[in-house]
Image: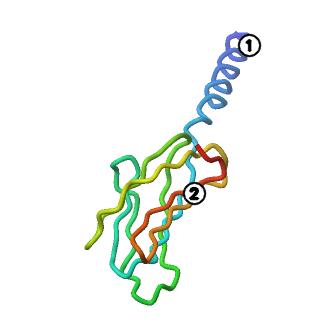
Amino acid sequence: MKLCLSFSIAFVCVLFAFSGDAQTFQVRFSNDYAKAVEFYIDGNFGCAVSANPEGNNAYCVANTSRGEHTVTVKGEGLDSEPCKFYIARPEGAYVNLTKARHLGCFSTLAH
């Protein structure tokens, strides 16, 4: 009986060890554009930043998983190309929409 209990506890510990891959990473989205925008990660809503006519470091944060991701942005007057980033480290990634409506993705490990 004790052997069965020990095996069960060890099995549960192994399952928890392998579930660590489901870890989430933060992505910070910065909006230097004067209008309100919404950021999407792989087609799913990430977060929104209100209008920023003063250009005063308006941002939001969303979580995503490890790996390669594509970011798109929606908002008035925007038709920018998507950008890609790859997350492999806890530092996450940074995405910036410039005043000139250029979308740039940055991460600690370029892909």
- Going from N to C along the chain, the mark reached first, 2 or 1, is 1
Q: Nearer the viewer, residue 73 or 48?
A: 73
Q: Nearer the viewer, residue 63 or 111?
A: 111
Residue 34 percent across, percent down from the top left: 37, 82
Secondary structure state at the residue bearing disc 1: helix
Name the residue at the bottom extreme. Answer: 54
Q: Nearer the viewer, residue 93 or 100?
A: 100
What is the C-alpha distance between the residues marked 2 and 1? 52 Å
Q: Which mark is residue 2?
A: 1
Residue that badge 2 annotates: 106
Amino acid at pointer 1: Lys
Name the residue at the left extreme. Answer: 76
Residue lying at 65% horizontally and 47% vertically, measured from the top left:
109
Amino acid at pointer 2: Phe
Q: Is residue 95 left or right of residue 34?
A: right
- Number of callouts in the render? 2
Residue 25 percent across, percent down from the top left: 57, 51
Residue 64 percent across, percent down from the top left: 49, 49
- At label 1, counting other C-alpha atoms closer than 10 Å, the crowd grade (few under 14, some 14-19, many 20 or more) is few
Residue 69, compared with residue 104, is above or below; it is above
Residue 77 percent across, percent down from the top left: 26, 72
Residue 85, compared with residue 56, is above or below; it is above
* Snapshot colouring: rainbow
Residue lying at 67% horizontally and 47% vertically, measured from the top left:
89
**In which quadrant of the rendered image does the N terminus lie?**
top right
Residue lying at 39% horizontally and 71% vertically, measured from the top left:
101
Kindly check if marks 2 and 1 are in contact, taking CB atoms under 8 A apart as contact.
no
